[in-house]
Amino acid sequence: MAGRSIEDKAVTEILKDTKRAAARAAAGGPQSWRGGQGKEVNKRFLNNTVLSTVYNNSKEKKKRSAGRLTREDQALFKAAERFKAKEEEVVEVAKPEEAASVRKGKVAISSNSRLQAYLKAHKEKKEKEESKVESKVEKVEEKKSGAQPFWRVVEEED
């Protein structure tokens, strides 16, 4: 009787496996009867591929948005316009001050301040490049006017 129960358990297990394989074959075709063999993932390759893709996508996004307003900028401008409109309706003031949109955790920067920051950075960059060129010219002049070599050409007398 104990041997019979072991055979029954074996048969039930084989039937379960067969049913699972049939379900797999219905979804994945005849090759899936064999089961999941050799499905290991090369994790180093996958990680490098994902990192490269994310980096390249961010580079392309920066190129596309160069010179154009981003979605955040557009949203800030719309919010500022709405805020100004509400302010003018509620209280009419002779000279309304610039309205800054109120956002949680973000600072609204006007396009004028962005322009000023860009011009300042551009000016500093030019000055830095000019100072590099000047220092190179000075080094070349120092080399030309530097000390004479320790050796000299000796002319042989015939």
Image (tube, rainbow, N blue to C red):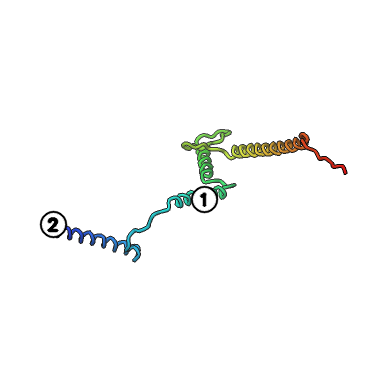
Residue displayed at 69% across by 36% down? 131
Residue displayed at 70% across by 38% down? 130
Foreground pick, 129 / 17? 17
Residue displayed at 22% across by 59% down? 13
Q: Where is residue 97 in the image (x, y as percent from the top left)?
A: 56, 34
Indicate the amino acid at tag 2. Answer: Ala
Badge 2 is on which residue?
A: 2
Foreground pick, 74 / 152? 152
Q: Position of residue 27 (x, y in %)?
A: 33, 62
Secondary structure found at label 1 = helix
Badge 1 is on which residue?
A: 57
Q: In this view, does 21 lie to the left or right of 97?
A: left
Residue displayed at 57% across by 38% down? 110
Q: Where is residue 18 in the image (x, y as percent from the top left)?
A: 26, 62
Q: From the viewer's perspective, is residue 8 above or below residue 152?
A: below
Q: In this view, does 44 lie to the left or right of 148?
A: left
Q: Residue placed farthest to the left in the image?
A: 1
> Quarter of the image holding residue 119?
top right
Quarter of the image with the C terminus in it: top right
Q: Is residue 9 left or right of residue 73?
A: left
Quarter of the image with the N terminus in it: bottom left
Indicate the amino acid at tag 1. Answer: Asn
Question: Mark 1 vs mark 2: which is more N-terminal?
Answer: 2
Foreground pick, 154 / 141? 154
Q: Where is residue 75 in the image (x, y as percent from the top left)?
A: 51, 44
Secondary structure found at label 2 = helix
Neighbour tally class for label 2: few under 14, some 14-19, many 20 plus, Cα within 10 Å? few
Foreground pick, 90 / 146? 146
